[in-house]
Image (cartoon, helix red, strand yellow):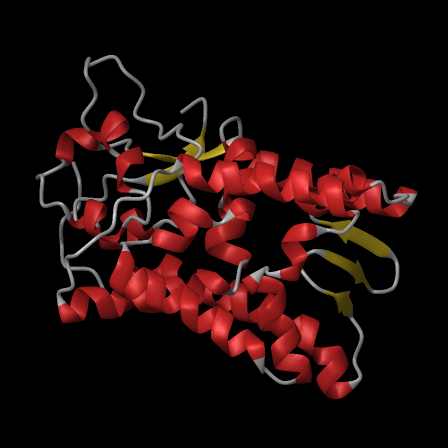
């Protein structure tokens, strides 16, 4: 039997708080060096060095480097493989919800959008971000430069915190306003090529959200209201056939666990893709 007794504030926001702690901790570790001279983590989310020993590389950056014709050092390849394997195991778009600092900006825009009851939404196809991803690779090949890094809001935000925001404020504000007044969850869900890349990895990843107690669902809709990609829930929560899997297998799922936070009936939990 599902325990439906009232939960504490911590229980209703546990995973959100853990996500925020993770995001700000990672960002702070990058800023420790420039701000305080403590170089535990050098570089940025595109390419970094941990404790001067472990190289980590964003696989999407590596692909752009290869497309541009740059010589790629062995540590960069090993770092990209390490990151790829990690997100293949824990869920590709975990990067979007647990690591990316722009997620804090877009979540804030979504919160304010709901508070102001702004319902207008420009229709943007989800395939747009895939086309932007492919365009970045083509432009990298044509120009010989890592194209997306020139306009990447994630990199610009981190660089701005170190050297002064400048133009970075414009880019970050544009992302915020796009999500606020143009379309719901517009940047992460429809435009960001980094999210598109990790979504491809996430299609086969091991760790998954699971509507394991879906028979306890009361159709309150809370999970759909908080989910950044609500279309991923329905196949697992309300399957076409009784024997369909309760595991959310869609690559768009960010494993943010907000559905666990808000569900009073405790329908959702973490599991593997095998349920």
Q: Is residue 268 visible?
A: yes
Residue 157 picture location, percent across and down: 57, 71
- Residue at 49% x, 28% y: name it: 203
- Quarter of the image with the N terminus is top left
- Residue at 70% x, 42% y: name it: 59
Identify which residue, 72 or 259, lies in the foreground. 72
- Residue at 67% x, 36% y: name it: 85
Q: Is residue 12 visible?
A: no
Identify which residue, 273 or 153, lies in the foreground. 153
Residue 247 picture location, percent across and down: 35, 27
- For residue 216, what is the image quadrant? top left
Check the image and report above or below for 161 versus 92. Answer: below
Check the image and report above or below for 10 versus 122. Answer: below
Residue 135 picture location, percent across and down: 59, 40
- Residue at 91% x, 45% y: name it: 73
Identify which residue, 101 or 36, lies in the foreground. 101
Horizontal relation, residue 103 to residue 269: left or right: right
Residue 228 picture location, percent across and down: 32, 49
Q: Which residue lies most toward the front here?
A: 142
- Quarter of the image with the C terminus is top left
Identify which residue, 91 or 179, lies in the foreground. 179
Horizontal relation, residue 198 to residue 256: left or right: right
Check the image and report above or below for 119 versus 240. Answer: below
């Amino acid at each position: 039997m599902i325990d439906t007794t009232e939960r504490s504030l911590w229980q209703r926001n546990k995973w959100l708080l853990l996500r925020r702690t993770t995001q700000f901790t990672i960002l702070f570790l990058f800023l420790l060096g420039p701000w305080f001279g403590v170089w535990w983590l050098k570089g940025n989310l595109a390419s970094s060095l941990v404790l001067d020993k472990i190289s980590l590389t964003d696989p999407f950056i590596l692909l752009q480097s290869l497309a541009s014709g740059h010589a790629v050092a062995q540590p960069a390849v090993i770092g990209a493989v390490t990151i790829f394997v990690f997100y293949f195991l824990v869920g590709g778009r975990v990067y979007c919800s647990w690591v990316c600092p722009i997620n804090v900006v877009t979540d804030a825009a979504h919160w304010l959008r709901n508070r102001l009851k702004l319902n207008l939404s420009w229709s943007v196809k989800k395939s747009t971000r895939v086309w932007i991803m492919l365009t970045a690779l083509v432009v990298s090949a044509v120009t010989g430069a890592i194209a997306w890094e020139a306009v990447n809001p994630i990199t610009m935000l981190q660089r701005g915190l170190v050297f002064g925001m400048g133009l970075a404020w414009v880019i970050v504000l544009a992302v915020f306003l796009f999500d606020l007044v143009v379309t719901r969850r517009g940047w992460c869900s429809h435009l960001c090529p980094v999210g598109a890349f990790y979504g491809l990895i996430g299609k086969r990843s091991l760790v998954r959200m699971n509507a394991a107690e879906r028979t306890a669902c009361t159709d309150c809709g809370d999970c759909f209201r908080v989910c950044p990609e609500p279309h991923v829930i329905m196949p697992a929560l309300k399957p076409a056939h009784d024997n369909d899997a309760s595991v959310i297998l869609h690559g768009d799922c960010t494993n943010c666990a907000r559905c666990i936070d808000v569900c009073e009936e405790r329908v959702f939990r973490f599991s593997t893709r095998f349920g």
